[in-house]
Image: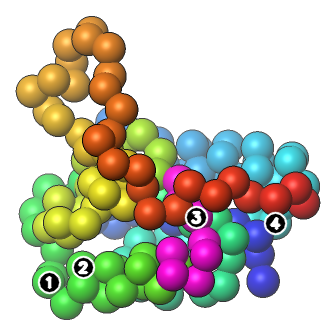
């Protein structure tokens, strides 16, 4: 069982602005350098629906340009909730906050959301009004 599963943006979850393979490889290297094992999954919807047992689920994905099938988003929701219910943690990286727009729970899971009209201003970011479901840090490797 890996300590960390890293979901890397590909297919519908890739975009022209973010180099997901490179950033996911860099994230995996940093995490491995801290002594944790990492499994990278590039099939985003399968990885979210069935991440397998792990302590941390790192999500590094973009926002699909068209809505994804409802049954796939529902399967992702169930997989994420099962992971959190089992005591796992989630780390959403950068553009992941723009994704999963048809999953109403996503901003609460991440502890925040992307607000496009405000994203390009240089105002101080406000913390989310409620804590994300899992805020327990990972124990040392």
Residue 88 among magenta residues: yes
Numbered mark located on residue 37 in the image: 4
Residue under the image location 36 percent in, 32 percent down: 127
Residue under the image location 9 percent in, 27 percent down: 117
Image location (x, y in percent) of residue 79: 43, 84
Q: Residues within 10 Å of mark 3 (few under 14, many from 20)?
A: many
Numbered mark located on residue 132 in the image: none
Query: Residues under labels 2 and 3: Cα distance?
Result: 19 Å
Looking at the image, which residue sits at the far front? 130
Residue carrying label 2: 73
Query: Residues under labels 4 and 2: Cα distance?
Result: 27 Å
Q: Nearer the viewer, residue 136 or 44?
A: 136
Residue carrying label 3: 89
Asked if the residue under mark 2 is in contact with the one under mark 1, i.e. CB atoms within 8 Å, the reply is yes
Query: Residues under labels 1 and 2: Cα distance?
Result: 5 Å
Q: Secondary structure at mark 3?
A: strand
Residue under the image location 17 percent in, 59 percent down: 101
Looking at the image, which residue sits at the far top? 122
Residue 114 among magenta residues: no
Note whether 67 is above or below 131 in the view shown.
below
Of callouts 3 and 4, which one flags the residue occurring earlier in the amino acid sequence? 4
Q: Secondary structure at mark 2?
A: helix
């Amino acid at each position: 069982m890996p300590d960390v599963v890293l979901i890397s943006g590909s297919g519908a979850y890739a975009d022209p602005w973010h180099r997901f393979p490179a950033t996911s490889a860099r994230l995996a290297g940093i995490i491995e350098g801290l002594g944790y094992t990492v499994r990278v999954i590039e099939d985003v919807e399968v990885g979210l629906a069935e991440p397998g047992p792990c302590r941390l689920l790192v999500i590094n994905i973009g926002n699909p340009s068209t809505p994804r099938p409802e049954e796939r988003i529902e399967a992702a929701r169930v997989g994420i909730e099962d992971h959190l219910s089992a005591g796992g943690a989630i780390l959403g990286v950068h553009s992941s906050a723009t994704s999963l727009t048809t999953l109403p729970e996503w901003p609460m899971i991440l502890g925040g959301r992307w607000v496009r009209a405000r994203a390009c201003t240089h105002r101080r970011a406000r913390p989310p009004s409620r804590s994300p479901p899992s805020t327990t840090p990972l124990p040392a490797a």
